[in-house]
Image: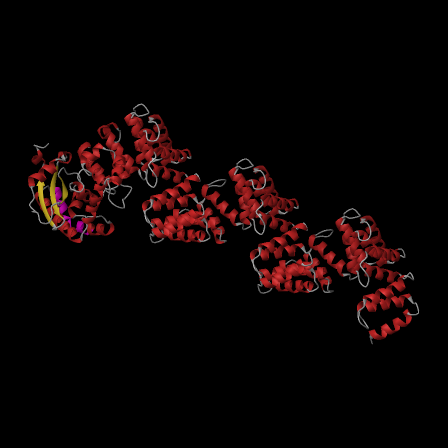
Amino acid sequence: MQDDKKAVYWYAKAAEQGYARAQTNLGWMHKSGRGGPQDDTKAVYWYRKAAEQGYARAQVNLGWMYEGGKGVPQDDTQAVYWYRKAAEQEYARGQNNLGSMYDGGKGIPLDDTKAVYWYGKASEQGDALAQSNLGAMYEKGEGVPQDDTRAVYWYKKSAGQGHSRGQNNLGWMYEDGKGVSQDDTQAVYWYRKAAEQGYAKAQTNLGWMYKVGRGVPQDDKQAVSWYRKAAEQEFARAQTNLGWMYEMGRGAPQDDTQAVFWYRKAADQGYARAENNLGVMYEEGKGVPQDDAQALSWYRKAAEQGYANGQVNLGWMYRNGKGVPQDDAQAVSWYRKAALQGSARGQTNLGWMYRNGKGVPQDDAQAVYWYRKAADQGYARAESNLGWMYEEGKGVPQDDEQAVSWYRKAAEQGDERGQANLGWMYKEGKGVPQDYEQAVSWYRKAAGQGYALAQNNLGIMYEEGKGVPQDDIQAVSWYKKAAEQGYALAQNNLGLMYEEGKGVLQDDKQAVSWYRKAAEQGYARGQTNLGWMYEEGRGVPQDNKQAVSWYRKAAEKDDATGQVYLGWMYEEGKGVPRDNKQAVSWYRKSAEQGDADAQNSLGFMYEEGKGVLQDYKQAVSWYRKAAEQGSALGQSNLGRMYKEGKGVPRDDTQSIYWYQKASKHEDGYTQSSAIYDNFIDEVFNIDDVEEVAKTYIKAIAKRVPDKPSVSTDPNYQLIVKESLINTYLGDEHKSRLREAYKEVMSPAQMQVYLTALNSEACAGIFRWDTFTKYSLSDMHDSTVKNKKLVGCNSLLEQATTETQREELIAFTSSISKEFAEKNSTEMSKALKQYETIKIVVEQMKKEIELPLPISEFQVYEDIVAGHNYVEQIFVYQDTFAEDETLEVDKNALLSEACETPDLLQMGINMHITWLDINHQHLLTHVVKKEDCKDVI
């Protein structure tokens, strides 16, 4: 039966008689605290007694006490002295330990060759620890040529004796496939052998195999269990790994406090990875109060040990001025240290510093060099950055296919930036065939990871209906996700959606709110849009000074739109004193960036000699630049210069060419009017009159105004249609053209025009002679400035009361019936369709919201489109006060009607109608062509 006290008693008896072996055993009992209190001093005393007698085991033990500073002051020289004494007696453990001192340069100069010599001597005697150590020398190539096969040989020798370090090392060779075929199962087998003996390193390695599922089924709980066993032995790597499991909530409940606890235990031992991780916890305020100074301190400890991640993080703190004054040069220094160790993150960050000229001279070639170093290691962010360099041709020849290749590598690793960039390449068809569905797919992957740029881009795809069904609600949803992350471009886009009421209820205040968020981040387009809201007084009180302030911020960032808007404010003297020179200066800045609006404006300034010397050639030059970009206004202006021979020789062919190009645009209705204004007399010189007329009318009809004005009101369409059909085209064309115009020329548009044509409020604005005298673009300016037009527009709004609507319907219905009864067979046939037409009209009223109702008669008119006898209805505004007579001076009406001979010459009978707004009273008088013979 074991009895340590009796063992100590008898060892002491023998030791006191000078028996070296007993003295050694007694020393070991004191060292181990067996049979009595643990006492290193007594252990040393008895080891020395035996060692001085030349007893090798005692010499080794005494050397070990000196090496560890146990019972004596720590002294490596004394340790070497006693190890050598034992080694020279061929004592294997003494030889191993002496080899270890040479290996570590402890108490003696470092000498790997001598270390191998002594390890070899001990190994040949079968010392398992020495065999493991000798294997390590072969594995590392220290003191001997590197040889994994020999390393495995000695590890197997050691492991075969059950030595835990040898077993662990052999497991590592199997895991890494060094000197043996790679075999995770064998690795786990040997790790487990060592781990079950309590060897902390093996326990840690076995835990890692469970964590990643190599050689065993993946099992985080088993990983935590083995990490904990090693951590409780104060093994720093295990403590760090256990901390990470707590931080991530893997195999144990997520617990930042526990993570910090274990990181700190390892960090306090000087373990660099733990120091770095503890720094991260302080930087992010996880498990500890956020503290950049503490983060910096721990990063520095790790960095100064050469730990690459710590160096990168320390560089990051310098780059961003966190816990330390901002210092790009220091950031570069630490990034470089990490990069030179092969840290992909360090290489990527160093590349970024070169790309942006931070802490080093700007150098795209160096940026590419470092990005490539990291990308070749498969580091996704570097792959994405390298792709961008190829896309932009920075530091390498521009190559979209290479860009796509690198973006794809990053994207397939799940890198959100690579996914978004790859989506962009598919959207634009750069380096790959254009494919909106693929673009959406990659944007969605990145957006799903919360990447704001991708969320914004996905919103654009929904707004434009590219790769997905058009869906403004989805667009708003994605813009909002990005905007709420503070992404300025998305904030601006969301503002636009609110401004235009797309996917959300129209809300100028919300638009302003989002524009402001983008603007305050310095996003130029957001600043421009916010300025526009101030200029227009939408969502904010109208304030030209604020508008100028925001336009200026954008303009000074070289935003072309902001520059042209600021130029406009100077030209008009809005929010700033009028200054044409300043206007020209800002127009020029924008125009030189290729902004077509600015090029037009600058051309106009040269044409008019405003802020510059008048110079028609310069005007033509700038109009041409705008025109060649496809600007309808530029094309129209250039056409006008050719027509008038200003700055270029007069050339009607060139003029018509540019006017026709202008007419094909969405906003071409304005410019295409100039074809009529300038070339109506020459229309027969164009080969296909019908096609020209149709193109012209369709161009006009492309836009529906928010409210009536000279420049946008559909009344102008009526004039052009009737003029072309009735004045310049033969009867054989009328039916065909009317059919062609049917889809774009609503009969109700006629009433909008007629409501205002002869009113007092609109007198001189909607006159036929006004249209023929000025181009529509000239008239547009008067709509902004002419206060008279406000009253005219007000009239159109007044003409929509329910009572007036009912009276007008009744009136037009009655004259329609009367007219049809008295006239041609064609009209009589049309009358028979009255009931059917009535249904159509009612349906049209539901679908088309216009200020005045559609009458059945106007539908008849379309049916008998080829007939020479066409009725027009003129509605007049009564300007008499309520207490004045309602008597109508029919002669005055006749004179007024006959002042528009163009219409009468078309063979049109005019039913002149007096509409008394105040008294809800309608009077009518028919004017025929012959009534105006004296006038005509």
Residue 919 placement, left or right of 777: left
- Residue 542 belongs to the span the image colors magenta: no
Q: Position of residue 523 (x, y in %)?
A: 44, 45
Which quadrant would residue 208 be assigned to in this image? bottom right
- Residue 835 belongs to the span the image colors magenta: yes
Which quadrant would residue 368 be assigned to in this image? top right
Which image quarter holds the N terminus?
bottom right
Q: Magenta part mainly helix, strand or loop?
A: helix
Count the numbered circles shown: 0
Residue 909 placement, left or right of 784: left
In the figure, 895 relative to 466: above or below?
above
Residue found 17% across the figure and 51% down from its top: 838
Q: Which residues are magenta?
A: 825-839
User: Which residue lies most toward the top here?
Assistant: 649
Q: Position of residue 824 (x, y in %)?
A: 10, 41
In the figure, 610 relative to 162: above or below?
above
